[in-house]
Image: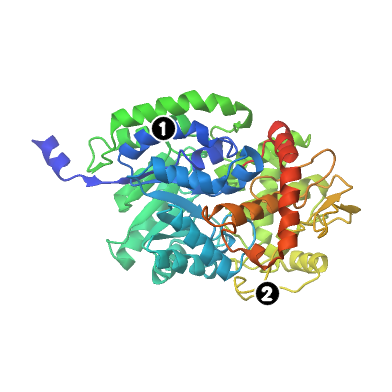
Amino acid sequence: MGARIVAMSQRTIGVTEVALRDAHQSLMATRMALEDMVDACADIDAAGYWSVECWGGATYDACIRFLNEDPWVRLRTFRELLPNSRLQMLLRGQNLLGYRHYEDDVVRRFVDKSAENGMDVFRVFDALNDPRNMETAMKAVTATGKHAQGTICYTISPLHTVEGYVQLAGQLLDMGAESLALKDMAALLQPQPAYDIIRGIKETYGEQTQINVHCHATTGVTLVTLMKAIEAGADVVDTAISSMSLGPGHNPTESLVAMLEGTPYTTNLDPERLTRIRDHFAKVRPKYAAFESATLVDTDIFSSQIPGGMLSNMESQLKAQGAGDKIKDVMAEVPLVKADAGHPPLVTPSSQIVGTQAVFNVLMGKYQVMTGEFADLMLGYYGECIGERNPEVVEIAKTQAKKDPITVRCGFMKSPIAEPSRKNSGQETTAKSIGLGWAPFTISATQSPVPIGTVDLLIKINGAVIFFAMEVAAAATYCKSAEPSEPEGVPTAMKAYSAPFKASLYEFVNVMRPALTLRLTSSSKPGS
């Protein structure tokens, strides 16, 4: 009788399966090809998930750089193979799926085209938790009739409080968020803070406020965190099928199901389907062993705060530079750089910006070399941080960038951050232009490492640094793929370029991309 009463009163907890995106992004540098996912889709579609995360984050970038895939085709394929599922993506607010702020009209059109190609749930976040950088994307999602999920990026610092997170939740709800996501990208969210934040949101804005919880597993505590979050009222939690879980990835889906047995909560997931999904990825995963993170459990993350999606990348990139023994030094430097920058949460792109600067500080001396992105972060071009920026470092940034700090929102400004030249090493170099008539592309004659976003911290190709090549490929994909029935696609800044420019651009991509793809896939292990 008692068991029946419990069963009758159980509250259903929704589950978002992340195996098709964040799991392989975190565990194996975003390298999983579409062909290794499609055979699992029928079981995923029928398992009973609240949503299936399958796009966004670093997948767009990795498709172009390393996998020779069209990310728009990937999205449309998932839409076809998962007809009964909510498809979910991770959208970096004003950054979209890139590493700088794009103009508002680009944001709106990209969201529109993503919805048109099959996306249902847009998890919108900003690396600095600056609501101004989420508003345009949130309103754009709402205008499409799709699900706008406002995101709180969790971090810890002397300035971050439960009350502050509850206040941010209210700002996102005022923007029209249909649900909220508490995003713990570095496995920093301990059980009690999770409970306190979720209860605070529910008590302040109503029990009907939907809260989704996203935790990585790197520190080993977050399965308990999910339990406390559920007890506090969380409605949906993110997990990864067990064969694609743990380490810098996520907690296992099957473990969550087992944990809730005998409690007032249930997932209602189909165990037979879960078994088949598990077995599929257990067979697939060994193909990507070369990209696997060596991290299993690392409680030092509570100090370094490096997110799971970045850890495997940083390890492999340092090894590629012959500096694998410096990983602990870099992890110790990251929180110092983070504090200088005003305590931003570490999530793409801020994690890569801060992490890369920490690498430079360790290898070259404290701020002896400053990346262009870090200079922009210090000068406010990515938005406002919760804390005050170190004024001495701000002065270094001003000198290098040759511009003043700003406090206005960047989205309405034209190209406010990191122009496509990507000349951001902080070092003078001898450059050579590729003669295609428009000549924006340069190859450095030095071996200065240049951070180019979430996929690569440090890349060297034949002794040179590529500043622009992959952003070109991404721009070409924007133009070609989002609208299959039309030649131009998403009207990004590419729309403003002349036909001869775009013809030269496509010529460049067609000539250079195969060689670059071969070189990168064989010799480097970037990821996000």
Residue 314 in view in this figure: yes
The one of 188 and 499 positioned closer to us in this rendering? 499
Seen in the picture, residue 400 relative to 98 is either above or below; the reply is below
Which picture quadrant has residue 489?
A: bottom right
- Locate the C terminus by quadrant: top right
**Residue position marked by numbered label 2 in the rendering:** 406
Which picture quadrant has residue 266?
A: top left
- Looking at the rendered structure, the secondary structure element under dot 2 is loop
- Looking at the rendered structure, the secondary structure element under dot 1 is helix
Where does residue 350 sit, x and y in percent of width and height? 62, 56
Cα gap from disc 1 to disc 2, whole angstroms = 48 Å
Mark nearer the N terminus (1 vs 2) = 1
Q: How is the image coloured?
A: rainbow
Q: Is residue 152 left or right of residue 493?
A: left
User: Which amino acid is tagged 1?
Assistant: Ala
Seen in the picture, residue 368 relative to 388 is either above or below; the reply is above
- Locate the N terminus by quadrant: top left
The one of 491 and 411 positioned closer to us in this rendering? 491
Q: Tell me how many marks there are.
A: 2
Identify the residue at horizontal 53%, vertical 49% (top origin): 72
Question: What numbered label is drawn on residue 40?
Answer: 1
